[in-house]
Image (spheres, rainbow, N blue to C red):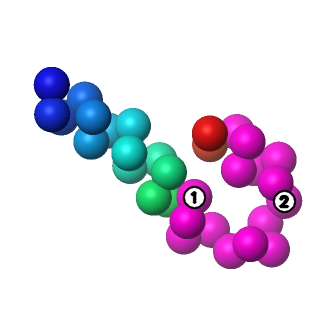
């Protein structure tokens, strides 16, 4: 079960890597 929680957390971390310059539309897709 712990592995399942780590997977969903991975995507959000990647979004942080993306510069704020990126359009909000891309952030919505990741969310």
* Mark 2 or mark 1, earlier in chain: 1
- Label 1: few (<14), some or many (≥20) within 10 Å? some
The region drawn magenta spans 15-29
- Say whether residue 20 is magenta: yes
Residue 2 appears left or right of 9 = left
The N terminus - image quarter: top left
The residue carrying mark 1 is 15
State the predominant SS element of the stretch in magenta: helix
Residue 24 point in image, percent of width and height: 82, 54
**Residue 13 placement: quadrant:** bottom left
* Residue in the image at 84% along x and 59% along y: 23
Relative image position of residue 5 (x, y in whole percent): 27, 34
- Determine whether the residue tagged by mark 2 lies in a helix, strand or loop: loop
Residue at 63% of width from left, 68% of height from top? 18
Quarter of the picture containing the C terminus is: top right
Q: Which mark is residue 23?
A: 2
* Percent coordinates x, y for residue 30 in the rendering: 62, 42
In the displayed structure image, the side of residue 20 where residue 12 appears, left or right:
left
At a point 25% along the width and 29% down the height, the residue shown is 4
The alpha-carbon separation of the residues under discs 2 and 1 comes to: 12 Å
Look at the picture and state if 18 lies above or below 12.
below
């Amino acid at each position: 079960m712990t592995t399942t929680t780590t997977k969903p957390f991975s995507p959000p971390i990647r979004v942080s890597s993306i510069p704020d310059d990126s359009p909000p539309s891309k952030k919505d897709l990741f969310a």
